[in-house]
């Protein structure tokens, strides 16, 4: 695992102090006469940034080694004349058809052994030397030509790294990676537990990427392949980054992470290699949960960025054609979601995409300019967003030191937890890393707490309360950090099926959760996973809690009981515990609490740990985030509810010019961004009227 590198971010900064507003711009899909109209419309909406060239490889290099930059020269000149900055992409996510013909060996192979070809995007074998050479070449050409272009704001390397390859190039690179990791085949055999099912390797040549096999695959093999793939893609990113830096271009280098329902990157380590962390975030649902999802994306990315600032590189504009993410966004939601990311440290709100295309696979993915054109309700909504972002421009400055958002609670997040849970040969089919972590964050959001995410092996001393909702496998460094956190006086809360194994997925014997048993003061002999839809009831104070997915037989070994199972096979047995160690407390829940129960439990833990909400007593669906700035702190009040609220406190609303001292009404589905005059004075948010 890689520690969080809060201070490792290099000095290259965005070439602007303004919030960026705009998005992916694909002028190559339109006749040149449209470009001038685009710039006029961008100016009308207050757009100041266009991400260009993401999928332009076939135009930039129509045949191997032959470049055509004329059109891109004209695009950049047109944008620059219009005062629009450029985030310039390297086009390496989509090699052109000639590349397949020239380098058939550089095509990716899936786990079934099928070789893929061009015709979509992301079709390359990342370990293939020909692909890597071609990437360095095109990145170098672009950097040499545009590295000091006055419109350039940032370099956008590739697009959403994440294509896994199981072919021969991957096999060779995987073996090199494994030799570095394990040194000898004996060690690999031990760590992969190959004594099981006669899997022992006697030659490195026999080690393959995980490919389709007869029955269940080796889980440690699968996990290591994920680790390797992330490292391999990171090497590819570094190569492009270094080629760009070598030209002397002063612009920061980023690559856009994807915050998805799948995950192939270890983002803590990647973030430390970037000048600027950026993310693409597509809401996975409509309704209020969409707001919690936006907050999740913002908090997670700010944390990867060591406390920020970071950049929201893509969000859907009005509608998306992504399966499962087809939610339509009303104009007011576009503003509130954008402010939610900005409040959490984004240096702007960029969208996919500027103009909705008339054809192609994403013809039904909305744009800032929709198919209906700029004379439309949605475009007027974007004009409004432009005005809002302009009005809060002063928020963009960063404080002299420390993070942009101060949080006392942190949730442990690590891609390896996700990958380990995805090995799927686990005691329950319903263990879901992403959903579990998201549920923890959602409950904290609903209770109004500011939240950070942390790597398990990060320094936790800044936090009063650390949650570990799902880390089935824990390495030594992580265990030490958690232990130090508690002995230093912190509170720790652990969900079930956490710390049951080491980082090689070997179960720690002697009772679960082996790695954390002494810290939590519990010992579990037997697991009782629940069936689909089954729930357990827990006696908790004078009320009850409800759990799902999991239960287990907890023996106390230093901990005290906070809640007991009621009814069923575990009737009367400990279900939720707390264990005081040194000056801190380690809490354990032996079942996955459902939403309301989780909120109650966490509310209690926050109170014990001395953690307060950003503003006490906010009405439901009113989100308040405090962002620190260069000259002041700012309170973002996002009213997602259907009723107006009144905000009272010492501040000035930048979006309307009104004062909040005597109370400021924020309309249903509205917002306010208040410059705080007195940092210590209390704020109140209550129903209006
Ligand atoms: C993103 C991708 C964009 C576009 C968008 C909408 O993940 O970076 O290029 O495809 O999704 O589907």
Image: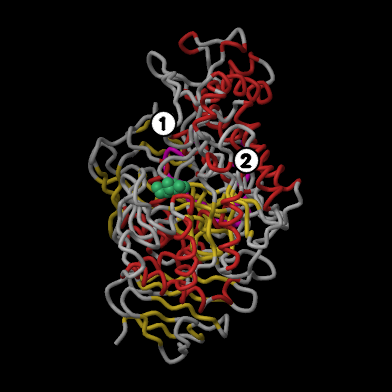
On the image, the x and y values in percent for residue 270 come to: 61, 44
Say what secondary structure mark 2 lies in.
loop
The part of the chain drawn in magenta is 476-500
On the image, the x and y values in percent for residue 189 come to: 58, 15
Question: Cβ(mark 1) to ligand 1 < 8 Å?
Answer: no
Rendered position, 489 above or below 209: below
Q: What is the spatial separation of the Cα atoms under label 1 and label 2, in whole angstroms?
A: 65 Å
Rendered position, 142 above or below 512: below
**What colour-coding does the image apply?**
secondary structure
* Residue located 51% across and 54% down the image: 300
**Position of residue 585 in the picture relative to residue 270 (left or right):** left
Q: Quadrant of the N terminus?
A: top right
Q: Residue 427 in magenta?
A: no
Q: Earlier in the sequence, mark 1 or mark 2?
A: 2
Rendered position, 226 above or below 305: above
Where residue 445 sits, quadrant-wise, is bottom left
**Depth check: 153 or 572 in front?**
153
Instruction: Give the residue pinned by disc 2.
Output: 67
* Direction bottom: furthest residue: 662
Few, some or many residues within 10 Å of mark 2 (<14, 14–19, 20+): some
Instruction: Give the residue pinned by disc 1.
Output: 525
Badge count:
2
Q: Quadrant of the C terminus?
A: bottom left
On the image, the x and y values in percent for residue 120 come to: 42, 36
**Position of residue 220 in the picture relative to residue 397 (left or right):** left
């Amino acid at each position: 695992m890689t520690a969080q590198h809060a201070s490792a971010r290099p000095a290259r900064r965005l070439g602007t102090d303004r919030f960026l507003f705009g998005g992916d711009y694909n002028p190559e899909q339109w006749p040149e006469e449209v470009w001038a109209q685009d710039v006029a419309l961008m100016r009308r909406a207050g757009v100041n940034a266009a991400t260009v060239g993401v999928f332009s490889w076939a135009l930039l290099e129509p045949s191997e080694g032959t470049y055509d930059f004329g059109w891109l020269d004209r695009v950049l000149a047109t944008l620059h004349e219009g005062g629009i900055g450029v985030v310039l992409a390297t086009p390496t996510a989509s090699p052109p058809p000639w590349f397949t013909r020239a380098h058939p060996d550089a095509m990716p192979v899936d786990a079934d052994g099928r070789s893929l070809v061009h015709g979509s995007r992301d079709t390359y074998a990342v370990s293939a030397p020909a692909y890597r050479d071609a990437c360095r070449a095109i990145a170098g050409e672009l950097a040499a030509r545009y590295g000091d272009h006055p419109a350039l704001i940032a370099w956008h390397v590739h697009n959403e790294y994440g294509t896994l390859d199981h072919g021969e190039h991957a096999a060779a690179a995987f073996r090199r990676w494994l030799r570095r990791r394990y040194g000898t085949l004996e060690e690999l055999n031990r760590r992969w537990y190959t004594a099981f099912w006669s899997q022992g390797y006697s030659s490195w040549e026999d080690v393959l990427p995980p490919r389709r096999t007869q029955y269940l695959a080796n889980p440690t093999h699968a996990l290591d392949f994920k680790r390797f793939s992330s490292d391999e893609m990171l090497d590819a990113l570094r190569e492009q980054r270094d080629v760009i830096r070598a030209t002397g271009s002063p612009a920061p280098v980023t690559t856009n992470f994807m915050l998805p329902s799948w995950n192939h990157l270890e983002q803590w380590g990647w973030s430390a290699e970037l000048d600027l962390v950026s993310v693409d975030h597509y809401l996975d649902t409509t309704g209020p949960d969409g707001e919690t999802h936006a907050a999740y994306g913002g908090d997670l990315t700010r944390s990867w960025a060591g406390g920020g600032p970071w950049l929201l590189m893509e969000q859907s504009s009005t509608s998306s054609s992504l399966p499962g993410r087809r939610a339509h966004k009303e104009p007011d939601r576009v503003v509130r979601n954008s402010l939610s990311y900005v409040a959490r440290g984004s240096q702007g709100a960029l969208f996919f995409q500027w103009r909705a295309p008339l054809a192609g696979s994403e013809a039904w993915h909305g744009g800032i300019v929709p198919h209906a054109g700029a004379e439309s309700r949605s475009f007027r909504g974007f004009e409004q967003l432009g005005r809002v972002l302009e009005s809060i421009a002063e928020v963009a400055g960063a404080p002299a030191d420390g993070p942009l958002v101060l949080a006392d609670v942190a949730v442990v997040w690590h891609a390896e937890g996700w990958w380990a849970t995805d090995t799927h040969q686990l005691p329950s089919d319903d263990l879901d890393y992403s959903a579990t972590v998201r549920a923890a964050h959602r409950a904290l959001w609903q209770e109004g707490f500011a939240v950070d995410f942390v790597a398990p092996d990060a320094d936790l001393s800044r936090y009063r309360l650390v949650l570990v909702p799902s880390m089935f496998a824990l390495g030594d460094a992580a265990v030490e950090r958690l232990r130090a956190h508690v002995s230093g006086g912190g509170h720790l809360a652990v969900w079930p099926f956490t710390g049951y194994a080491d980082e090689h997925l070997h179960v720690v014997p002697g009772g679960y959760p082996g790695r954390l048993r002494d810290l939590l003061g519990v010992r579990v002999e037997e697991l009782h996973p629940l069936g689909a839809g089954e729930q357990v009831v827990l006696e908790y104070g004078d009320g009850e809690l409800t759990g799902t997915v999991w239960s287990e037989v907890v023996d106390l070994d230093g901990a005290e009981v906070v809640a007991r199972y009621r009814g069923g096979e575990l009737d009367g047995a400990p279900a939720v515990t707390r264990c005081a160690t040194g000056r801190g407390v380690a809490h354990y829940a032996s079942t996955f609490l459902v939403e309301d129960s989780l909120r109650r439990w966490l509310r209690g833990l926050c109170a014990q740990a001395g953690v307060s909400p950003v503003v006490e007593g906010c009405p439901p669906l009113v989100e308040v985030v405090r962002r620190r700035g260069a000259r002041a702190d700012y309170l973002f009040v996002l009213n997602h509810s259907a009723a107006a609220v009144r905000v009272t406190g010492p501040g000035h609303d930048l979006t309307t010019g009104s004062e909040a001292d005597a109370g400021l009404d924020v309309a249903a589905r509205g917002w306010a961004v208040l410059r705080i005059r007195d940092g210590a004075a209390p704020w109140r948010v209550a129903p209006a009227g």
